Image: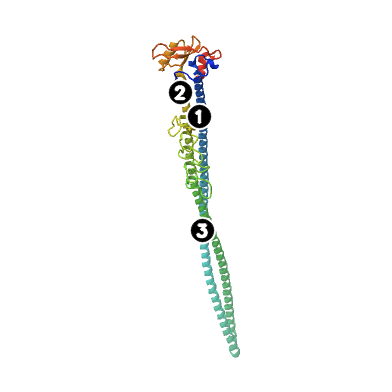
Amino acid sequence: MTTPARPGSFTGATDNAASGGLFTDTLIDGIPDIIGADVAAAEASAAAAKVSETNSATSETNAGNSATNAGQSATNASTSASAALTSQQAAAGSASSVAADAATATTKAAEALASEQAASLSENAASGSATSASSARTAAVAAQNDAIVKAAAANTSALAAAASASGALGSVSAAAGSATAALASENAAAGSATSATASKNTATTQAGNSATSATASAGSATTATTQASNASGSATTASTQATKASDYAVKVNGVVPSTSDYSSKAWAIGGTGVDQASGGGNARDWATETSTTADNSEYSAKEYAIGVQTGQSNGSSKQWALGGGTGFTLATPVTGSVGSNPKYSAAYWADRAASTVANFDEFYYGSYASDAAAENAHEAAGKTVAVGDLYYNTNDQAVKYCTVAPSGTGAPVGTWVAIAATNTSNFATKGFGIAMSIAL
């Protein structure tokens, strides 16, 4: 605590009776000046403390804004997580579609195989029928040739019978038998030809059936190919959606492909394009970053609360409370510098206000019934009685000041003079009231 200097005498006084002042004793001419200076110092300390309080409120608001930005980053992370879940569900749906398409393709392939086998059997049957028709045709031709040969033989026999009168009857009978045989052979040939035609028709029908089966088989094969292609496309879609879901969840090296979105992990703990990016910043930086800004312009909640970054020119809440600089030093300005509009912490101005009150206590003792009681109380507090000190005498109901100090502790009482020339009728509560007003 600084002990104020006390001059041995007051010089240059203008507040005396000769100058129109209230006091007649030149030894106390300077008291109003001292009291006025102390009042001005107390008022300045109170105003500065008010400024520190306002600056602390500003830092608290800034910390709140940073906390809001951290909440927004957390919200962005939650949105990216929802998009990842949606993509994952789409991938699961595509995988189910792939399984259904694969099952359909398997069924169609089995149908195509059965049709192909039926076509092969029909083709074999047609081939057998064609072979039978060819054999029947050959047999018919042979029968017809035989009939022709036999007819020729019959004609020859008839001619021989006509020429031979003696054997006419036998020849006619032989010719009639030969003709009957020839007719039977011709009928047989006609039957063989009909059988051949029937076999040919059967072969044609079976060949048509085989062609129809082959066409159906080809159609089933085409359907199977289409279903297989669809299954492949669904599998590709499922893979794409699965990759997208993974990117929305954990990708930290840029945006999710084909979008302008960042992943949940990037918004939560950081990633390329999010960290210290204008309008961005990850949730962790908004909460705890104390070495730089969170979004290339604003600082984190922790920085506004307890940080000491030089770029953060507004000061943190802790600096405004305790003191400026990296060490939160009481005498170091929070903003500005000594000689250039410095602004100090609340603790600094509280200390200054306490010092002002303490300085006033050095020379104003309070209310006592006698000079000795006032001196003893002051010395008991470890203080020294000096010329110009004041106290309020309750018996005289007047403020008294010391004109001659005692020579030492326990020495005879000094000389105390009442400020009789001062009109105290307008004082709030006599001398004590005005003294307390000055102190506050």
Type of amino acid at the residue the image marks with label 1: Ser
Is 411 placed left or right of 107 in the picture?
left
Which of the marked residues, 1 or 2, is nearer the chain's N terminus?
1
Q: Secondary structure at mark 2?
A: helix
Q: Is residue 170 above or below residue 202?
A: below
Q: Nearer the viewer, residue 291 or 224?
A: 291
Q: Quadrant of the N terminus?
A: top left
Q: Secondary structure at mark 3?
A: helix
Q: Which residue is mark 2?
A: 355
Say which mark, if any, is on residue 109.
3
Q: Give coordinates of residue 119: x percent, y percent.
A: 53, 64
Say which mark, if any, is on residue 52.
1
Which of the marked residues, 1 or 3, is nearer the chain's N terminus?
1
Q: Disc 2 or disc 3, which is closer to the eye?
A: 2
Residue density around tag 3, few if under 14, some if 14–19, many if 20 or more, within 10 Å: many
Q: Give coordinates of residue 91: x percent, y percent.
A: 51, 49
How does the figure colour the protein chain or chains? rainbow
Q: Nearer the viewer, residue 111 or 170?
A: 111
CB atoms of marks 1 and 2 within 8 Å: no
Q: Give coordinates of residue 421: x percent, y percent.
A: 52, 12
Type of amino acid at the residue the image marks with label 2: Ser
Distance of label 2 from label 3 (alpha carbons): 100 Å
